[in-house]
Amino acid sequence: MADMDVFAAMGIAGFGKKAKQRQLDPNRFEKNKRADTGTLSSSAGAHVKSELDAGPGPSSSSATPQPTAEEPEFDPDDIGPPPPPQSNDQHESEGEPEFDASEDESEEAQFPITHELILKDHTKVVSALAMDPSGARVLSGSHDYDCKLWDFGGMDWRCKPFKTWEPVGSYYIHDLKYSNDGQQFLVVSGTTQAKLYDRDGEELATFVKGDQYIRDMKNTSGHVAELTACAWHPKDPQTFITSSVDSTIRIWDVENKRKQKTVIVVKSKERGARTKVTSCAYSPDGSLIGGACMDGALHMWQTKSNFVRPSMTIEGAHTKGSETGSLVFSVDGRTVLTRGGDDTVKLWDLRSFKKPLLVRTGLATLYPNTNAIFSPDNKYIVTGASAATKGGKGHLLFMRRDSLETVKDLEVDNTPVKVYWHSKINQIVTGLSNGQICVLYSPDMSVNGAKLVLNKGPPRKATIEDMSDAVAAPTIITPHALPMFRDSEIGRSTKRKREKERMDPRKSRRPELPVTGPGRGGRVGASATQHVVQNLVRDTTRDEDPREALLKLAASADENPVWTAAWRANQPKPVFAAVEDDDKDDKKE
């Protein structure tokens, strides 16, 4: 029996006074609703339009939906019940919540993009984004050299970060990654050293940089050129990798910041045999390390190998000289998604690693670190396309994985650079080129995250107690009404008492006067101090004859010997022969 049933049987309604609960505005999410939720593709749009024209009716609500292969990944048991279907039958809502994932469902319901929350604090393009595994915090890095930590649970309606800092001075932030447990994160910037921070943004370690005068990259302790990306091992929380412009991918141990564990030297077909590694990633099982290079090549290494040469390689995967912004493995580890600086998105199959499965072209790219990601259910691909003109609207594209056809084209205020879709809270975080961070969500499909900010309700009105004394009505104080001027006894003057207290240095709080002379009152002046020190240091034994000093003690030694007192009674007295002076002998002669 539940606790409440036991209380009811005993006649106990509750303990103490019930706390007053604040009623939230049911329309609190409407002010953040997007004016448009994007445009659909031609084929999908026609299909959805016919569904919407039909409208929800009794016939459609009574029909049992048939689940197909496009069932969303979000389980109602994990994220809470979805909104009930619009129908006139009330008995359906009493049972288990039903989530219609059929083809007849509108495309808006598949993506949490109906509402948005803008986080504005950066001044330049947001070049790096990460979220902790719980979805409670957002970590952002920008070209304004700052990293910022945002906490959905702690933010109010102003939406400001709780911590801002410059990790490495005036260097761009290239990549940010949370560890699998969410207790620490990596910061990769334009320097040669990666930095490790704890959850609250306190620096834990700065990893060593290598010797730039050594030609062989295997013999250096760290990177010797600018870093580009990083990735945590999916299974081992103590291991991560970093890629760099020095043509290497280095495997590090969190506990050893003095030297990397292993060096993967990427060899190029070009002259000089070096290239820039622009992105790196681990496969979901940790058995593969992938790297995309500036010469257009795409390499894969087995983590159990000696890393002398890659296990799989594709030359010319992207256009030579273009920077590949991201490299992502699918959940099953068989597919690789790359977003190139040549305005393309390509899908690769590791089982036939020779040519891409699918290619999508025409995606304008203004920033080389523009990325592409898989949706949590692994059925869609999301990436950003830059604006056609400066300051124009950017586009966030939702494409089918099996065909790379655009399902949804979402227009945003500026060019989207970084995209992150968190599977636990079902919200999409996008970093824009104007410094804004756009959090897309749906009140029905999303959980917590941006919804927590609005669940707090409007700010409380300031009362007179909250206002400072300067803003509040001033209090007039007459000078002679103060306690120091008030007479203790009515009718009796305290002038003599004040004059007497004025002469007392303690009551009048007179400052200490400078000391003159040898000192007094326990305080020693400078001259007296110098005199004492001279006496302490001075050695007087140099000024005295040692023979005279010994003879002074001869009389006291004879009278009261300390060591030979036992032999005074039985020892014979010495008799010395008289010795004549030489001067007397000379005179006699």
Image: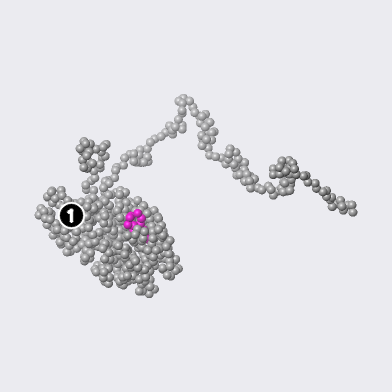
Report how many numbered discs are placed on residues in the image: 1
- Residue 350 seen anywhere in this rendered image of the structure: yes
Residue 387 image-quadrant placement: bottom left
Please tell me which residue lies in front, 492 or 380: 380
Identity of the residue drawn at 49% across and 27% down: 493
Identity of the residue drawn at 27% across and 46% down: 456
37 in the magenta segment: no
Residue 38 image-quadrant placement: bottom left
Please tell me which residue lies in front, 192 or 333: 333
- Residue 123 seen anywhere in this rendered image of the structure: no
Task: Identify the main secondary structure in magenta.
Answer: strand
Query: Is 377 left, or right, of 190 in this rendering?
Result: left
Question: Residue 390, how many percent across, how many down?
Answer: 30, 62
Identity of the residue drawn at 37% across and 41% down: 470
Mark 1 residue type: Phe
Question: Residue 551, how many percent across, how many down?
Answer: 74, 45
Position above or below: 475 against 437: above
Identify the element where label 1 is drawn: loop
The stretch of residues the image draws in magenta is 177-189
Quarter occupied by the N terminus: top left
Position above or below: 526 against 46: above
Q: Which residue is mark 1?
A: 99
